[in-house]
Amino acid sequence: MLFNNVFELVSSSWKLLNKSRKFYLISPIATRRSLSVQYGNSALLTAGAKSYINKCVSLCQPDRIHICDGSADESKLLQELMLKQGTITRLTKYTNCWLARTNPADVARVESKTFICTDRKDQAIPVTPNATAGALGNWISPADMEQAVKERFPKSMRGRTMYVIPFSMGPVGSQLSKIGIEVTDSPYVVESMKIMTRVGNQVLEKLQSNGDEFVKCLHSVGTPKDRKVAVPSWPCDPERTIILHKPDSNEILSYGSGYGGNSLLGKKCFALRIGSTIAKREGWLAEHMLILGITNPKGKKIYIAAAFPSACGKTNLAMMTPTLPGYNVECVGDDIAWMKFDSEGVLRAINPENGFFGVAPGTAMSTNPNAMNTIFSNTIFTNVASTSDGGVYWEGMEEPNINNVITTDWLGKLWSKQSGKPAAHQNSRFCTPAIQCPIIDPCWEDPQGVPISAILFGGRRPKGVPLVYEARNWSHGVFIGAAMRSEATAAAEHKGKVIMHDPFAMRPFFGYNFGDYLKHWLSMEKRGRVPKVFHVNWFRKSADGKFLWPGFGDNSRVLDWIFRRVHEEDCYVDSPIGYLPSEGALDITGLQQSVDLKELFNVPNDFWQQEVNEIEQYFKTQVGEFLPKEVFNELTELKKRVNKL
Ligand code: OXD
Ligand code: MN
């Protein structure tokens, strides 16, 4: 066990005893040092939780312990503390809203510093002679992980409070939910986790009855080696940031970053990376997908799960206001889906999260009124601009009064439109409770999950990829997921508009070898009734660089076609890449702008031949022998069809 080794090295003789509501850390070598639980009820802790906390205390040596209860009083306490520390400011224009400005060096997920630790490299990533480093994740050996931990975590919480966050991913008590304990030295993380997950004593109570099973999540914002904290209100250690996952023991260790994707360990680290490994073991799926419910004019409802890479409009689609009359969309989740077949063979999904950690720029009444009507209470904003009337501002937000207020940009500097600089960081975020969404689905917390009828894959594809097409069958659908590509976004450290491969929108989130992941997806067909699979692309552009499709609420027209295909309506034509809407099948009545449907659904010969070659190259170099033959066969068949174009 990695932890044991680390502890042996760090402080083999430290002991933590729990005396009712007090912990005493006793060292026979050092002078006796007492460590009090300054907040929370340690009597509720299970033996497993105590032992984990003990290890974290020994390693990180905090000054105080705070066991989170998830209460409003606790939030008040931590908000006051963060105000004093300068981590947040109050946004007086709204109710219980806060703005955090990070260290400018800590603004996004750090994919290059994110690792999966397994004994063998090929358990974590496909090993091929010409694989590009990091293309499908990064592997770290147990010895190197131990070293990385040893170099960063010992005493990393000295002078700080260690917060213990018991949290549930998914409704507490659902068969589909899982529990985690995040230990962190960041009150910002605590308050964000209280929005994004279910936190509190009810989780500890559940632990008592679930065999004390939880994912161990240790997070420290860290301190640079030279101890010079560049931005005291946002301590972090960007030079040495590292995010480590150990699927074998369900452990996550994250050091050096306070940014959400790296520090709210329930989200990407647990719900996707560790989640996907648990899902593989237990026979279900943990995916980077939104979940929405859509009701047609006849009152029939289906649920759809959709995978798009970060910042491709998942939140917008999940909360869409349909322009197609009579349709109604409701939101179950905007980022992650856990899906499992029930005893009847129906694929059921829960949103394991409790909030939305959405990208702010571009969110506006015109693009996503439901998000705008969600986020102005009980929300933590990060790296957006602030206005002198106590409000927020970001690019794309319609703010008629913006010229009448003084605006301060995400860096804390006075800002004006004339500066030509963005006011908000392009990856600035809102962290807001899901329950506040005006169109939250009535079943969003149903412990059984909602039945999934269709799975959508998509990305930003300016050229060649039609608005929508349907997979011929499940293995073709798995191939489409594997072949997904999209323009890079700002959610991670990538620059520019290169078209990156992002299979299943999971490229940064695989917890195990992508080849094995594909096999697992293929195996789903044997476990229950698999949904229909589609590929969508809202982002195709004309030769003069304009979007061919209006997107947003008009995407309901695409969902309508999908709805009808789910019900086996004969409204499609075959094409080399899959089924397309037949002539007139896409309902464009009342569309506010004219669209060139021919161009939108064109499947250009040269583009697809190139695309197939590119996918083949990618599979060869990055997946190699780990590619399941079924997926290879799908590629061969597509190649044949495309070459006949
Ligand atoms: C996110 C992401 O924050 O995908 O959801 O990066
Ligand atoms: Mn995401």
Image: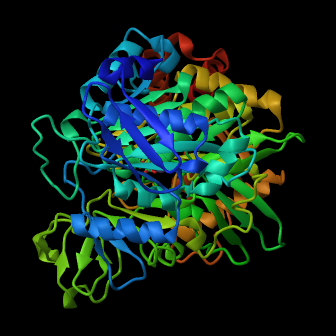
Q: Is residue 640 visible?
A: no
Q: Which residue is located at x 19 percent, y 69 percent?
A: 409
State the residue in front, 204 or 18: 18
Q: Is residue 351 above or below residue 421?
A: above
Q: Tell me the quarter of the image containing the C terminus.
A: top right
Q: Is residue 190 above or below residue 215?
A: below
Q: Residue 431: x percent and y percent?
A: 44, 63
**Image quarter for residue 520?**
top right
Q: Is residue 626 left or right of residue 562?
A: left
Q: Is residue 159 left or right of residue 477?
A: left
Q: Residue furthest right?
A: 344
Q: Is residue 498 left or right of residue 370?
A: left
Q: Is residue 525 visible?
A: yes
Q: Which residue is located at x 50 percent, y 62 percent?
A: 195
State the residue in front, 415 or 356: 356
Q: Is residue 341 left or right of residue 458?
A: right
State the residue in front, 53 or 341: 53
Please count the marks in the image: 0
Q: Residue 338: x percent and y percent?
A: 65, 44
Q: Residue 169: x percent and y percent?
A: 60, 48
Q: Which residue is located at x 47 percent, y 44 percent?
A: 182
Q: Residue 512: x percent and y percent?
A: 53, 24
Q: Which residue is located at x 36 percent, y 45 percent?
A: 35
The scheme the figure's colours follow is rainbow
